[in-house]
Amino acid sequence: MSAAAVSGAAKTAATTTAQSTKKNTVYLFRHIQTSQVLVSLKSSVEKQSLKQITDVTRRPAHVRPDHWHPLVAIQGFSRPQDALSFHNSLRDHQLNLHATKIANPEHIAQPRRLRAPQEMNQVDSTLVKMVELLNNQPNKGKGMQILWEREGVRKSVLEKEGAELSLEGFEHGELVVKRGRDIVNA
């Protein structure tokens, strides 16, 4: 076998390994103005992801990549099916979040100008739910890595009042982002 064939096979194997790792990664993006959160299996936000925002009046008409910044990337799911089920559970939480808020009579009694920011602020509740789901994973964090937008986000989630949250057994790192939105290391 020639040297070119060997190096070509090595590149193919490295690409396949990198792609399988990306398939086992779940990304969370936050809107920089409204604090809405989208969950994705891809490293960028696509128009179909906007369907996760159930309130049509709050849903942006199109994706502006400069408005959606990566919040968290979770890597190391043992199988793509595990990543997909985690993604679906988190997405279902997002879909039910709005319905829960509008079902609360105290919330509806508030003026719309006060309700709107509360309905759009999804970062805290989504991150708390993410931690709960991660703690229920079968491998308990072995081989899993959570890349955070910044260390302050992780600390604020773990210090939530009344929440029994811990991320023991998980590796933590910083999410390296280029141009404010392009993920480099996940």
Image (cartoon, rainbow, N blue to C red):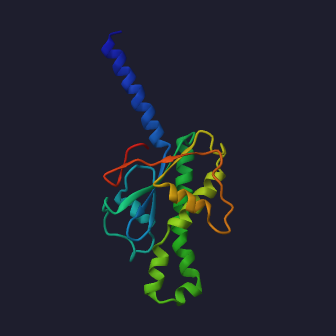
Number of numbered markers: 0
Residue 70 image offset from top left, x and y in percent: 42, 55
Residue found at x 38% / y 71% = 59
Toward the viewer: 52 or 118? 118
Residue found at x 61% / y 59% = 158
Direction top: furthest residue = 1
**Does residue 81 appear to the left or right of 177 in the view shown?**
right
Determine whether 134 is above or below 107 in the image: above
Residue 27 image offset from top left, x and y in percent: 46, 52
Q: Quadrant of the C terminus?
A: top left
Toward the viewer: 17 or 114? 114
Residue found at x 57% / y 81% = 103
Determine whether 44 is above or below 126 in the image: above
Residue 117 image offset from top left, x and y in percent: 45, 78
Toward the viewer: 184 or 139? 184
Determine whether 3 is above or below 148 in the image: above
**Does residue 58 appear to the left or right of 87 in the view shown?**
left
Q: Quadrant of the N terminus?
A: top left
Q: Quadrant of residue 3?
A: top left
Residue 173 image offset from top left, x and y in percent: 51, 46
Residue found at x 38% / y 77% = 57
**Does residue 28 appear to the left or right of 107 in the view shown?**
left
